Amino acid sequence: MTKKERVLAVLNGQKPDEIPSGFWLHFPEGFENGEPAVSMHLKFFEESRTSICKIMNENTIPKNPLINTAADWSDIKPIPKDDPIIVNQIALVKEICGKMKGEAVMVATIHGIVASTFHCLCGVNHYNEKRMMLPEMLRENPEGLKKAFGVVADYLSYLAAECVKAGCDGIYYAALGGEKFMFTDEEYEEFVKPFDLQVLNAVKDAPCNILHMCKDGLNLNRYAGYPAAVYNWGIYSDNPSLVEGRKLFGEDKVYLGGLDDRSGVLVDGSDEDIIKAVHSVMDEFGTDRFILGADCTLPTDVELHRVHVAIDAANSYLK
C-alpha cells in the first residue's frame, strides 16, 4: 500500500498493511509563500515519512487596526474573495497538491472561527494570555461578535471549499474556544458552534476532514456531532484520553494522536522511550481506526529521527 492508500483504508474502516501517521510542524520564517513554501512541504513530507501532507497555513487574517473595543466589531467588513489573503493561499495549496502528484492525503490548514477572529483582534501570537478578550467583548457586544464570527465564517467557508477544489482531500480545522474557562456552554452553543459547522459543512463531502480541538481544559462534549472524519486533540493538556474521546465521538470516527507534541518522549526521550510510549498507546487504544500522531504541531527543530522511531514502533506493533 502507498501512504495515501493506508490513510484511505483507515477512513473506510479497513485494515492497512501499516499504521498511517500524521505529524507536522511550523516551518522556519521565510517559508510561508511561493516556491520556498512548496519546496519545504515536499521536503518535510519525504524526510519525515508521515502519511498525511498538512499544508501549513501561515497566512492568517492580519490584525485589524480598526478593532480595539467591543463596539468596533459592529463595523467589521466582509473579506472580498479576490483579496490577496485568499488568492495567495489557494495558489499555494494548488501548487503543493500538484507537485505531490497523489502521493499523500492532502489537508489544508484552516484556522477556525475563534482562532481567526482572535488573529483579527490581536495577531497570531499571545492567544493563551489574551484569549479571554473575546468572551469579554462578546458579553459587552453580543450582536457585534456574532456579526464578526459570521464574516469570518463566510471567509473560511469559501477558503476551505476552494482548497478542496485545488486538490486537497479535506481540511485540518483548528477549532479553538472549547476551553471550559473561556466561553460558557450556552455562549459556545449560540455564538461559536453554528459558525464552526458552517465551515465544516462547506467541505462535508471531502473524504479526510480532520477536526483538531486545540488547547487545554476542553469540554469535548461541545464538539460531539461535528461533521469530520478524523478527531484529534491534546490528550496531554488536561483533556480526556483517546479512549475516553472515542466513547464520546463514536466508534465510526478515526482518531489521530497518542503522543505529546512539545514535551515528552518525542522531544527529549530515548529511542527506547519512544517505542515504549507508542506501544503503550496502542495497547490502550488498539489499532483500528487509528492514525499515529501528536497532540498538535511538533517543535520546528525536532529531530526527524524521533518521528521515524515512532512510525517504526507503530508498525513493529503489528508484527
Image: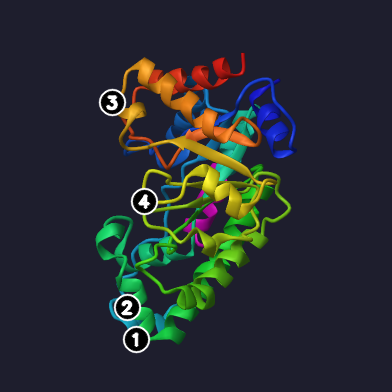
User: Is there CB contact under 8 Å for labels 1 and 2?
Assistant: yes
The residue at the point 31 percent across, 23 percent down is 269
User: Residue 173, which numbered label?
Assistant: none
What residue is rendered at 60% in x and 30% in y?
99
- The residue under label 3 is 268
Q: Which is the main secondary structure of the residues drawn in magenta?
A: helix
Does the magenta portion include 90?
yes
How many residues crowd mark 4 within 10 Å: few (<14), some (14–19), many (20+)? few
Query: Which residue in the structure is indicated by mark 2?
Result: 136
Count of marks overlaid on the render: 4
Q: CA distance from mark 4 to mark 3?
A: 21 Å
Residue 238 shows which numbered tag? 4
Q: Is residue 295 left or right of residue 91?
A: left
Distance between the Cα atoms at labels 1 and 2?
Answer: 6 Å
Element type at mark 3? helix
Q: Find numbered disc 2 in the image and state the secondary structure of the residue it sits on.
A: helix
- The disc at residue 140 is 1
